[in-house]
Image (tube, rainbow, N blue to C red):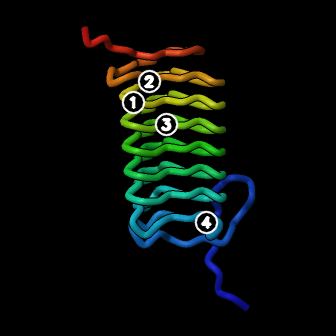
Amino acid sequence: MTNETKYDFQDGKGPVAAHQHPNGGGWVADTAKVADTAYVGPDAQVFGNAWVSDNAQVFDSAMVSGNAQVFDSAKVSGNAWVSGNAQVFDSAKVFGNAWVCDNARVYDSAKVFGNAEVYGNAIVYDNAQVSGDAIVSGDDLVGGLGVMAICAGQYHGLILSITNSD
């Protein structure tokens, strides 16, 4: 008989084999992969087949699940949830009650926060900020070329902030 530690991630699958991450103490399912260099805070959770690597941080009550990936120096915090096949990387931040899922990507120095949702194949990049109750979905792109794009309401389409050096 083994002495396997189990934890219930409240995802409908009941208690599963899990451990507390050595860097932060947060719960990590044994099916997930979290690098020793990553930080998972004491109230954060990483489960499913999710990956958290490099110097990424998941803290507060944030969750990373499914096949989601958080890497480089990205941060997921507050009550934010990154799930599905979503990716958050570079120096991107997802926080508050934000939700990033499906095949969405958030990268560069982009921020998704408040009650914002980014899903489908949507991409948020550069210095873009998606906040409030904003919804970015489908094949939407929010970002630009070094200029901050702010999306605070429901938006479907393309936002590209382009500067002219002339």
Furthest residue to the front? Answer: 166
Asked if disc 4 and disc 3 are in contact, CB closer than 8 Å, the reply is: no
Q: Earlier in the sequence, mark 4 or mark 2?
A: 4
Of the image marks 4 and 3, the number of the one nearer the N terminus: 4
CB-based contact (under 8 Å), mark 4 and mark 1:
no
In this rendered view, identify the residue nearer to me: 55 or 77. 55
Query: Mark 3 packing: few (<14 Cα in 10 Å), some, or many (20+)?
Result: many
Q: Position of residue 13 (x, y in %)?
A: 74, 58
- Say whether marks 1 and 2 touch (CB < 8 Å): yes
Pointer 4: residues within 10 angstroms few (<14), some, or many (20+)? Answer: many
In this rendering, the answer to whether 33 lies above or below 104 is below
Question: In this orientation, which residue lies closer to the viewer: 153 or 165?
Answer: 165
The residue where tag 2 is placed is: 143
Tell us which disc is closer to us: 4 or 3: 3
- The residue sitting at 49% across, 48% down in the picture is 62
Which corner quadrant holds the N terminus? bottom right
Q: Are marks 2 and 3 in contact (CB under 8 Å)?
A: no
Question: 117 or 55, which lies in front?
Answer: 55
Whichever of callouts 1 and 2 sits on the residue coming sooner in the sequence is 1
Measured along the vertical axis of the image, is residue 81 above or below residue 128?
A: below
| Gap in angstroms between the C-alphas marked 4 and 3 | 24 Å
- Tell me which residue sits at (65%, 86%) in the image: 3
Residue bearing mark 4 = 29
- What residue type is disc 3 on? Val
Which of discs 4 and 2 lies nearer the camera? The answer is 2
Residue farthest to the bottom? 1
Q: Which residue is mark 3?
A: 106
Q: Secondary structure at mark 1?
A: loop
